[in-house]
Amino acid sequence: MNDGNWTIRGARILGGDVRDLHVSDGVFAAEAPAGARVVEADGLIALPGLVDLHTHLREPGREDAETVATGSRAAAAGGYTAVHAMANTDPVADTAGVVEQVWRLGREAGYCDVQPVGAVTVGIAGERLAELGAMADSAARVRVFSDDGHCVSDAALMRRALEYVKAFGGVVAQHAQEPRLTEGAQMNEGEVSSVLGLRGWPAVAEEAIIARDVLLAAHTGSRLHVCHLSTAGSVELVRWAKSKGFPVTAEVTPHHLLLTDDLVRGYDPVYKVNPPLRTQADVEAVRQGLADGTIDVVATDHAPHPVEAKDCEWAVAAMGMLGLETALSVVQHTMVDTGLLDWSGVADRMSVRAAQIGSLDGHGRPLEPGEPANLVLLDPAASRVIEPGALHSRSRNTPFAGLKLPGAVHATFLRGTATVLDGKVIDR
Amino acid sequence: MTDGTEDLAVLSAAPESAAEQAMRAVLDASAVQRALTRIAHEILERTQGADDAVLLGIPTRGAHLASRLGRQIAAVEGLELPVGTLDVTMYRDDLRLKPARALGRTEIPGGGVDGKLVVLVDDVLFSGRTIRAALDALGDIGRPRAVQLAVLVDRGHRELPIRADYVGKNLPTAQRETVQVRLAETDGQDAVLLGVKKAGSR
Amino acid sequence: MKRHLLSTADLSADDATLILDTAAELARIADRPIKKLPTLRGRTVVNLFFEDSTRTRISFETAAKRLSADVINFSAKGSSVSKGESLKDTALTLEAMGADAVVVRHWASGGAYRLAHAGWIRSAVVNAGDGTHEHPTQALLDAYTLRSRLGSLEGRRVGIVGDVLHSRVARSNVHLLATLGAEVTLVAPPTLMPFAVDTWPCSYSYELDPVLPKLDAVMMLRVQRERMDQAFFPTEREYSRRYGLHAKRMAALPEHAVVMHPGPMNRGLEISAEVADSTRSTITEQVTNGVSVRMAVLYLLLGGSEPAIGTENEEGAK
């Protein structure tokens, strides 16, 4: 379904040449179609519609925080045309039934493609494999499997999962966190945690699992994707694994590109997240890793929480931060404006590679005639002060509240249908 | 050392608050000393020998004045009166008008105050509220048989029914004026200064 | 604008000295027939305790009452396991009651900070111990005790021995003693020493015996037996042998050195009964001094139009 024909005039394609784009019947066309509506895109950057490999839409189970509808709406506002919805819902997405439900809710809402992620283990309990094949064969066509929220810490189980998904081209996305080293952990283990009296989450707890898993990936010949990598040591490990040709990919969140554990000094739970905010040295290392491609994608790990889960003492607060509506601005601020990445690099890290890793047809494609018209137009010269109340998400827990960030999404197109126009979400 | 023509620059070089302009001396060092000597004699006279008297000075300058009076009385009569200090900060009725203040020292002489004649000593008597606070403080410490008050300067404008028994100098003043006592122990020299304060200070 | 006492790291040397000097003056009223001052008459101080602590609560209660304040004791149930009433809801209830100051003890590090800055209440907040973070009035009464036994703290060598990692008393003491010019040495097994302790304003050692002969004061921290089950040390016997202060070790201290303990003690584990009851021990004085110090804190925060010490209250907190 599309709402007709479009001509997008004068956009900078991937930040490079200025060209007109034409859309007809949901795909890009070589020439202006009849009756095309015009979008003046002078000065705007055209990127393939963004693809998020890591989002929490909370439905089923936690609709007070977010639903598939509100979350995918927020995604469109942030320039996304596809998001992968993580499986730690209630009930957990560990059967064909639940993943199909989430997939259908996404299609009904129509703001972006919602691609469900299947849990690796039943109930995300880390004990038995879930019916991965059934989920892969379902209408939701699950290819990414993750127990995110928890680590598949049992080495034997991780091995089996990696092997099993080879049958249908799946990938296991690991939340790397050795549970025994992080019992009761509250924030990054470092100078700040020792002064604040909060139990530390040491970098080694992430790195030790990554080290093990990249070797398992090589041993099984199966694809491993490292979720929300956050430390300098983790970047080193992935770099090493790639240099050996291991089938490993990795993602970093926008917040780990910008924020450090110093922010925890005020004990404001908006900064509580898993993996935790790290040190400035880690921030520099992940930026460098994203710039040189060691880290393949920026994935938001959008984690909505209701107000009462954050308006309390640190120790009882939930972990997680919003991300869909600020990701592009944070990437512009930390990577483009610093000269580490150009806009075609942004297209690669926020769309192309994510679609490849997720085996998502139709997304992350070149902006060429014949390709599906999944597109975001961004105004790099705009800037905005992030206001939690102005976000489209049902929740308000953004760590960027009050920050002035560059860039604003002007329009988003999902297979030729405008989901955002003139900076406003189009509801049906 | 010092005579009636003080160097105003010297005296105003160490004002207690920047809101006060240059002050003039209404009592010089020798006048202060004479006043104290007179008060000492008066105390001895009116208490008929002062054998159960206790001098309690109100910090900071009242405490020094009480010590001086004690020494003066000892020199004149050979009588060692118990001398102590009574800090009234915690009993002030104007605590909430200014930031919390550091406390002065309270030292009650060994014999206590019960049944004694307590002579409170302070530098300036103005509204009378400090003395009211001193009476409350004293009441929580014991029960004197009588309480008298000795001040170096009485500048009028009482806001409570309080009067001094011994006065070094009666100094009629306007409300907008300010009176400051300087003592050698705290300020390097003895003097009583009078000036006009800028609006907003108290 | 109210200010708070949340951490000794917020106290300058002048602030700390003002508190100690004020406490010294207030200590004298304990000798008077009427142990009361009218200064905080009509003010309400709430003791909000999310963790049981009869001793600290009574100390604060006595301090507030000696200043003629009204005291309300609010014992809130709840822990990280059984949540109970939320901190926010409890705070909103107190605000509705019009508390001038809230003395709060909470099991979560940062609990007092959140109460002070989340925008729920306008009262002054005094941290009576938050998780493993800080216990500022304990450090102040420890400094007061040391000062009264040893004179000025400048250049004094103080050892703090025990479970430093989980000790809010240790953290508060390290900040405060460093601010007052003392030299602190932490002693603990490596498992109980905080990560990044080398960035703290003190030195540290894994061995107790070499440190003892140089100290002017040694502060023993309580060691919880549960730490043994979490593999922080193998057995009580081994801990006591390597880090316990028994008579022989006490004899290794210089003549003038004192022994402190914030209480409650595990007699026989970190400190022997003999040492706890010796004349070097300041343990009972610490309790007495606690009331004077807490009176000083309450007076300096509440007694004037604005406090004389403490951290700013931030406007526009959530």
Image (cartoon, coloured by chain):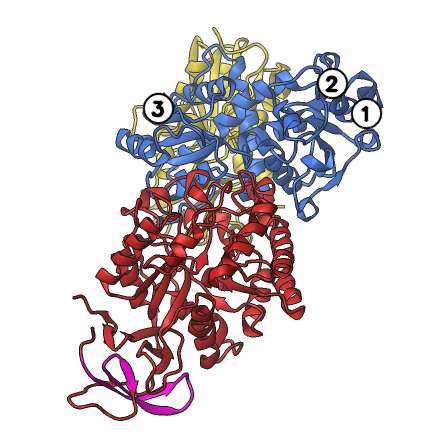
Chain colours: A red, B yellow, C blue
Residue at screen point 84% across, 32% down: C210
Q: Amino acid at mark 3?
A: Arg
Q: Mark 2 to mark 1: distance in Å?
A: 10 Å
Q: What is the span of residues highlighted in magenta in the rendered image? A: A4-28
In x, y percent, where is residue A77?
29, 67
Relative to A247, residue B115 above or below: above
**Earlier sequence position, callout 3 versus callout 1:** 3
- Please rate how many residues cluster around mark 2, counting C-alpha atoms within 10 Å: few if below 14, some from 14 to 19, many from 20: some
- Please rate how many residues cluster around mark 3, counting C-alpha atoms within 10 Å: few if below 14, some from 14 to 19, many from 20: some
Q: Mark 2 to mark 3: distance in Å?
A: 38 Å
Q: Are marks 2 and 3 in contact (CB under 8 Å)?
A: no
In the displayed structure image, the side of residue B61 where residue A205 appears, left or right? right
Q: Chain of mark 2?
A: C
Q: Which residue is mark 2?
A: C280
Q: Tag 3's secondary structure?
A: loop
Main SS of residues in magenta: strand
Q: Which residue is mark 3?
A: C41
In x, y percent, where is residue C4?
44, 39
Q: Tag 1's secondary structure?
A: loop
Relative to C179, residue C42 above or below: above
Q: Are marks 2 and 1 in contact (CB under 8 Å)?
A: yes
Query: Label for residue C253?
Result: 1
Q: Tag 2's secondary structure?
A: loop
Q: Amino acid at mark 1?
A: Leu
Q: Nearer the viewer, residue A115 or A383?
A: A115
Relative to C178, residue C263 above or below: above
Can residue B189 be seen here? The reply is no
Magenta span contains residue A229: no
Which of pointers 3 and 1 indicates the residue nearer the eye?
A: 1
Residue B190, picture quadrant: top right
